[in-house]
Image (tube, helix red, strand yellow):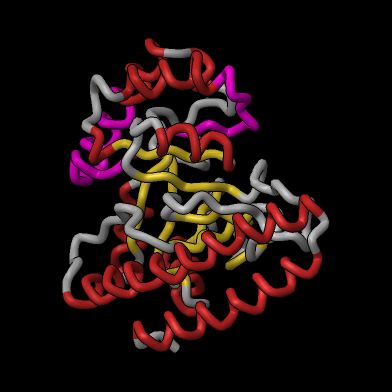
Amino acid sequence: MIKGVDYSTRPASWPAFFDTLKGKGYTVIGRYLYDYDDPKRLTREELDAAFAAGISVFCWFETSEGAALDGYKRGVAHAERALSELRKLALPEDLPVYLCVDFDATDSQLAGPVRKYFEGARTILPLAQMGAYGGWRSVRYLADAGLVRYTAQTEAWSYLNGYWPKQPVWHPGACMHQWTVHGPGKIGGVQCDGLDIVADCGAYHPDQGDEMDASIIELIKLNRVSHVARSYDVEIIRAEIKGDTERVAKLEADKLQDLEDVRKALGLD
C-alpha cells in the first residue's frame, strides 16, 4: 500500500517537513488549489521541496464544505479556477482535480444540486481529470453515475455498521481512503490526515519513472486484494444485520483464507 497525507497548514520549513514525511514512509500529499492566500493553498515553494524529497502530489479544490450544493454554475466556476491554478503552478493541465463534497450529502442532494455541480465542472474538465472527495454515499453516487474518474473516500460518513472499532465501509471504486479521526496526527509539527492509496489516484511527480511504474503495479495487485475483501464485507454486514452470528463467523474465516491465497498468488508479503 502507498501511504500519503493531506494537511491544511504550513510548517516552518518545507524541506524539513518533507524529510520527516518521507522518513515515516509517506510518499504522496494532497493539497488545495486556491487562488487566494491561505495556509491550505499549494505553492510552488512547497511543490519544489516535495519533488526534491521524492514526494508526489495530487490536488483538491474546495472553497467551503457545502459549495457543491450551489449547483451547475458553481461547478463551472470551480473547475475554471482549479485549471487556472494548475497553470500558475506550472503543473500539468491534465492533472486530476478532486472536487469536494465535504458533508454527509443526502440522496436528494446528490441527485439534485451536487449532480449539477459536477455536471457543470465536466463542461471544463474532461472525465479523465474529474475527481471527487466525500463519504460513502457521495462516492458511491458520483462513481456509479459515471460523473468522475477518481474518488477519495473519507472515513467520516462511511461507518454503515456502527462506529469505531467497526471499520468504515469503503466503496470498491475509491482509490484513496482518508483517515481523519484515526489518522497519524501531527507529523513534523503539522496536523495530518492519513491516506491509504489503494489504486491509481493520479498523483504527479516530474520524475516519474521505473520506481513509479513499480508502485502502480503494486497498486493494481493491492486493488485486487481489496476487491476480494470488499465482496466478503458486504455479505458479513448483511449477516450481522440479520443477527446470523454463525454465518458471520464462517464468512470471516473464509475471507481470511481467500485473502491469504490471493496475496500469495500475487506475490505480496
Is 96 a magenta residue?
A: yes
Image coordinates of residue 254 in percent, x first then y, are: 60, 77
Is 18 a magenta residue?
A: no
Which is nearer the eye, 173 or 61?
A: 173
In the image, is residue 262 above or below residue 152? below
Image coordinates of residue 38 in percent, x first then y, are: 50, 36
Identified at 30% across, 58% down, the residue is 48
Identified at 62% across, 31% down, the residue is 103
Decide if residue 11 is on the left or right side of residue 207.
Answer: right
Decide if residue 205 is on the left or right side of residue 17.
Answer: left
| Quadrant position of residue 107 | top right
| Magenta part of the chain | 80-109
Q: Quadrant of the C terminus?
A: bottom left
Image coordinates of residue 163 in percent, x first then y, are: 78, 53
Which is nearer the eye, 27 or 188?
A: 27
Q: Quadrant of the N terminus?
A: bottom left
In the image, is residue 252 above or below residue 14? below
